[in-house]
Image (cartoon, rainbow, N blue to C red):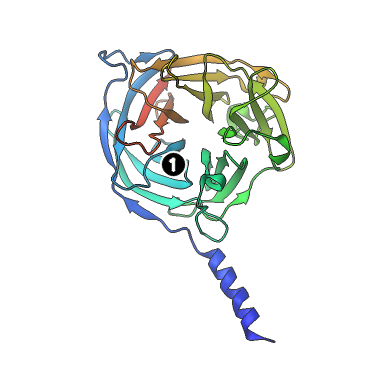
Amino acid sequence: MRLFPVLAAVLAVFAVAQPVHADEIAVSAHPVTTFHIGSSDPVVGRLRFVGGLELSAADKRFGGLSGLRLSGDGGRLYAVSDDANWFTAELVRDSAGRLSGLGPVSVGCLCRQDSTRYGSKHWGDSEGLEVDGDTAYVSFERLNRINRYDLGRDHLPGRPVQATASFKRLNIGYNKGLEAMALAPSKGGSAGSSIAGRFVAIAEESLNAAGNNRAFIADDRAIEEFAITRSDAYSPTDAAFLPDGDLLVLERRFGFAVGLGMRIRRFAVGDIRPGAVLSGEVLAEADLSSRIDNMEGIAAWRDGEGRTRIALVSDDNFNKRLQRTLLLEFVLDE
């Protein structure tokens, strides 16, 4: 037996097995106490603003946040940026449950199998995030796919494994792909639906023949298509399932004619099925008369009083001079 081939194989396995390296970075958090500029009215559509944070950091890796999840008790934040960075931190709340700060922020890499970085957005344009217990799922927009990651005790992701059948045959537009993604719970409000335990993914600007956003129901066996109507220049940026099973879709628009805006629509879980064309219900809409930025991430959780809370995060595009990273939280009027 020759030693060198055996040694090389052992070293290769060892390299793959290395944990993802993580750093702790300093992130400043400044309270956001009102949502509407010049008004203390907390109401926006069917939501009520209950506080937020403006986040900033000198570390160049911080920013570009495009996918968001909170733990079931609202005590931990998970986020991904569109250059394949992973962030997690404890959320600090005051006696009324309002956001008041962040604990230490850990940043890690959504890396290749060998723990190296992708090196470009061609492979590493991570956009959507789902966390289910000790497992995370991340959607990537350019080479459209959904990866699965096991989370360690430090809440950091391990090596990627493809979570669904391949999206390649669907010819989704490059840089117009899987921007929004959520996993339909197999328990709770969506348990009896046909999509329970399956992913819903929505393309940002890849449209069907009718001009609507292409959307997909996916698992490890098959991918089926439906659509959500496109209107008023809005594009989907993220999605999350509510505790009752319905789907929230966060949308953003930007242009000289329409300005900057955000919108949240709600879709009944029972309506989501292959071939459907869905319009949903508008829960909230806001523009630059309110404290918004490039809103890209949405999450939902239920607090100790049984209220459904909705959190939003903005993507500053790593343009810290002109844009902000905002973490905003609302209560849903049910």
- Residue at the spot of label 1: 78
> Residue 200 at x, y = what percent?
62, 32
Q: Residue 28's image quarter?
A: top left
Give 75 or 259, whichever is nearer the viewer.
Answer: 259
Can residue 303 be seen here?
no
Residue at screen point 58% across, 70% down = 12
Quadrant that contains the N terminus: bottom right
Residue at screen point 70% across, 43% down = 166
> Residue 79 at x, y = what percent?
44, 41
- As drawn, which residue projects farthest toward the front? 256
- In the image: residue 188, left or right of residue 208: left
> Residue 281 at x, y = what percent?
55, 14
Q: Is residue 143 above or below residue 260?
A: below
Q: Is residue 240 above or below residue 277?
A: below
Q: Is residue 148 above or below residue 230?
A: below
Callout 1: helix, strand or loop? strand
- In the image: residue 172, left or right of residue 94: right
Few, some or many residues within 10 Å of mark 1 (<14, 14–19, 20+): many
Give 252 or 142, whichever is nearer the viewer.
Answer: 142
Residue at screen point 65% across, 26% down = 214
> Residue 297 at x, y = what percent?
46, 32
Q: Amino acid at mark 1?
A: Tyr
Give 304 or 201, whichever is nearer the viewer.
Answer: 201
Residue at screen point 62% across, 82% down = 4
Number of numbered discs visible in the structure rendering: 1
Give 242 or 146, whichever is nearer the viewer.
Answer: 146
